[in-house]
Image (tube, rainbow, N blue to C red):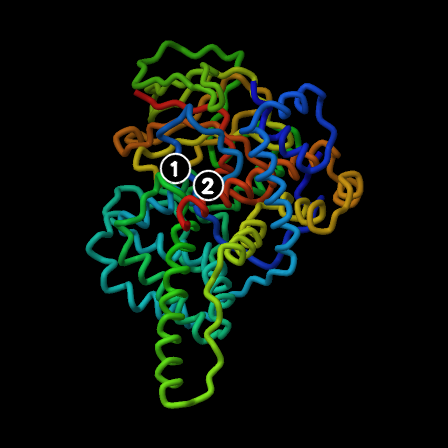
Amino acid sequence: MESPSSFVRPTSEVLPAPLPVGRAATYGGHVIEDGEGFVNETLAVRLRSGDPEALSEAYRHHSRLVYSLALRGLGVPHDAEDATQQVFVSAWRGRHGLDPNRGSLAGWLVGITRNVVADMHAQRARTTRNLLAVGSRVEPPDPPLDAAVVAQVVVAHALDRLGEPRRTIVRLAIMEEHTHEEISASLGLALGTVKSHVRRGLLQLRRTMEEVRNDAS
Amino acid sequence: MHPDDEVLAALALGEEVPGDVTAHLAHCQSCRAVLADLRRILDQVRAAESVELHEPPVSVWAAISAATSASAAPDDEQSAAPVRPVHPVATATEPSVDLRVDELAERRTEGKRRPRARWLIAATAAGVALGVLGVQIVGALRAPAPTPVVASAQLDTLTNPRRGGDATLVEQPGGLSLKLSVEPLDAKNGYLEVWLINTDLTRMISVGVLPGNGTAASFVVAPGMLAQGYTIVDISREQFDDRPQHSGDSLLRGTLG
């Protein structure tokens, strides 16, 4: 029997989670294994319709992803902050281009982030050329965000957003390579429950990655 | 017949799978592709251990908020909705149990609002089927008196759609009653919760908890819910996780009409 005390609740991120409604109208279509896809789809619909609360919710859910990507792509916190700001402002202004049926909100934001980072690199390159023209020694510009880096950050973020106890179980099983039996014993969960969380967690991550790929590529 | 994704996930994770699955993979390119994709994601998860996620400073949101607030007002249709939207408010300090507050729930609690999730845990721990927030649960044995039916819905399973039960909204003194008659549903380690979802797909309210192994129950519903668009009946499986919102794990669903 799982009880709320049988696993340690993470303290790193306490978000007021939104209400999942989304595929409700198209019932009969989709098994909703996790709330996440569901939640994001509703959020996308609300954002598109101009609900300012949806923007703040999208920020709460995805600002770590956007900022971490920008930081990887730009290397400097100051620039990453500017990029994050640009991404969410662009997302708001360009919300009519958000298609809730295609990809995910995260994927859409990742796509915008890549564009913003690329633009900022282009600006840096122009500055560098100007400086080179006057004979200064300047480091060559950093490489922009490539797909592998994006995938890594997106996976880390998706993992972070798996609900508990799934997140802990997936971390223990895949990252730390504990056996299912060890996890079952240490968390006090049935072996079958642990196995099912690892499998479904993996499928959930795949789904997130697919959505991001569909939209950001 | 392709194996279930969960079987492919088990295989990717190095678990034993039945022989016919491996035989199937030998000649099924699409399943091999899924398996390869899952293995690639496993590698990415392992690599993600070194990835640090960073929180942007609060000044970033302040700047975004300032830059977008001017354009926010014209499109804001939500504020005109008759029932307060139940999506969370922006303040992170707001307790999560309050996120789903709506007029109906407020009326039910009559000013003594209590964290609902704790009620549920307490209720189930005690093994007692009891009303939550004043919701009336009527046992299967009690025969309902013939009453005028306002609307009804066939409740279907979400996987391989088939009829799994029925919902009827009937008039009763003092309001409406949502009567459910469903096949036995497996709550696993959690409990079953009944929801009314708005057709605007942004709002939902919890109407109560289906007693464990219960195949019939009725819930008091405020008049006007139908008119406000709360017509989708949904039964979800919830965990005892202190998260009052819908888990996303829906078992049955149908639209009242």
Would residue A204 appear left or right of A9 to someone viewing this image?
left
Quick check: A138 above or below A38? Answer: below
Q: Position of residue B71 (x, y in %)?
A: 23, 61
The residue singled out by tag 2 in the image is A37
> What's the residue at 47%, 70% (across, down)?
A74
Classed neighbour count for the residue bearing mark 1: other residues with Cα under 10 Å, few (<14), some (14–19), many (≥20): many
SS class of the residue under badge 2?
helix
Query: Residue at left 45%, top 29%?
Result: A30
Residue type marked 1: Gly
**Which comes before the other along the chain, label 1 or label 2?**
1
Host chain of mark 2: A
Element type at marker 1?
loop
Taking the spot 36% from the left edge, 86% from the top edge, the residue there is: A133
- Kindly identify which residue carries mark 1: A22
Residue A215 at x, y = what percent?
Answer: 40, 47
**Image depth: mark 1 or mark 2 in front:** 2
Amino acid type assigned to the residue bearing label 2 in the image: Gly
**Quadrant showing the N terminus of chain A:** top right
Residue A1 or residue A21, whichever sits in front: A21
Q: Residue A203: horizontal and vertical position, in percent?
A: 57, 38
**Contact, mark 1 vs mark 2 (Cβ under 8 Å):** yes
